[in-house]
Image (spheres, rainbow, N blue to C red):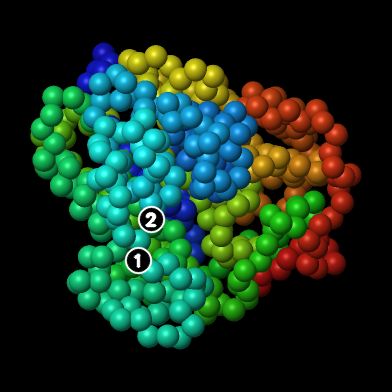
Amino acid sequence: MANDPQKNILLISMDDAVAFWKYKSIFGGALQTPNLDRICAQSTSFHSAYCQAPVCSPSRASFMSGLSPHHTGVTKADAHYFDKVAPPKMWPAKLRKQGYYCAPGGKVMRGYSALPQEVHEEIYSTPHSESLGQFTLGRRKRHFAGRVIPDQVEYGGHRGGPATTTPESDNQLYDNQVANSAIAFLQSYDQDAPFYREVGLQSPHGPWTTPARFKEMYDFKSLNQPKDWARGFDLTQTPAELARENIDSRRRRYWRQSVRNYFSALSYADYQIGRVWDALKASPHADNTLVVILSDHGMHLGERNWFGKSTLWEQVANVPLIIHDPHQPEGQVITDPVGLIDLGPTLMAYLDLPPIAHSAGRSLLPQIRGARVPDRAVPTFFEDHAAIRKGRYRFIRYGDGAEQLYDLTEDWWQTTNLSPEHPAYQEMRQAHAQCCLDYGLDLSAPPARQPNAATNDTATDGKTTLA
């Protein structure tokens, strides 16, 4: 198949979305994503895709530039990361220089507000004034403290479970505004230049506000914790700041309501993605538009008493990544580990454009077209902490030198840290060191303290038990 440099690109980004296919029935109650399911039936789904950072700005700076966090210098939350990553390094800016009409639409590059004018004008073709106040975020309070808010009710659980109750308030939700804007664009765009259009959703980011009907989709009483959680979670050697607790998952009703809130928000994102997908397929651009669907990172949903992100374990690092090529509309699943950092190199290869200089990412186009590729280690970084997924294992090394090894085939929830005597330990340790070096992190400096020192022990055996 010849490359077509005139393909359009539609990039749909979710915020804090888990690799949803892993959660279809993992808590008993079925996670409902009918639109993502039908899109996957016509697309390539990467079930072992990993973010390069477990928080928003370093992850987005990485996958939108094709550079690793330690090459961008953005390794933690940073609202001003364009001070470190020049806007021309973003691959949409490279598309614009190649004649693409590049248009923003929601949270993709950074936050929910418009980018600074000088940054916007380097990346996008649209006037900066059109992005100012384009979408309103509405209320995102962490707690409503029992107060009555017009057109909203609470369903309980972590952060309250807010829901809108009228068509007017439903329509004001951020994701509805973003989807409406994308649909209008797809219906009206008639320029000769190929387009790159962003669709940046808030969902399923907290506080998981949805129309009430999405909360009602789920009977929270049907949700149950996996039996593996009863073994407890080994938190020895984990820095305390990465093993925080913000929920007591032993409070089963509260935990179930919290998962219901998250699932409802993911289903709401699915609904809006379906609307945009249908608009694309009904438009003149249906047969010439690549569609990419991804999330910046995942979430813990109560395991380790943590409902959040910012760790290096599988549930945060593993993310959805879907690529739809209308010229190859057969569904396929790729389980080899890949990274979000591969997105830019993949699109450059699709469009027959020069590769991204100094990118540690790889084009996924050979895999999409059926080729097998050599096994690789794919990293996730947070400040000076680093993890890799390679084969069946996850290996983590923290900035103080402490290390963890998990067998994801036998222990997907990572309850048991394998010892250095494990047959795969040294091989994974070496792969980790080389991968970090390739991605810009030199581990040759001595650790800040001795490894093997237990931190954040919440029980005498070094485990926190949730059941």
Q: Is residue 391 visible?
A: no
Tell me which residue sits at (49%, 37%) in the image.
Answer: 82
Tell me which residue sits at (53%, 55%) in the image.
Answer: 299
Whole-percent x, y for residue 40 in the image: 32, 42
Q: Is residue 69 above or below residue 267?
A: above
Quadrant location of residue 387?
top right
The residue under label 1 is which amino acid type?
A: Gly
Comparing 124 with 252, the one in front is 124
What numbered label is drawn on residue 345? none
Whole-percent x, y for residue 435 in the image: 66, 27
Quadrant of the snapshot with the N terminus: top left
Judge the density around disc 1: few (<14), some (14-19), many (≥20) Cα neighbours within 10 Å: few
What numbered label is drawn on residue 202? 2
Discs 1/2, front: 1
Q: Is residue 434 above or below residue 419?
A: above
Residue, disc 1: 138
Measured in 3D between alpha carbons, the distance from the residue under mark 1 to the one under mark 2, in whole angstroms, is: 11 Å
Q: Regarding mark 1 in the picture, which secondary structure is present there?
A: loop
Instruction: Judge from the rendering whether residue 225 lies leftward or rightward of residue 275; answer left or right.
Output: right
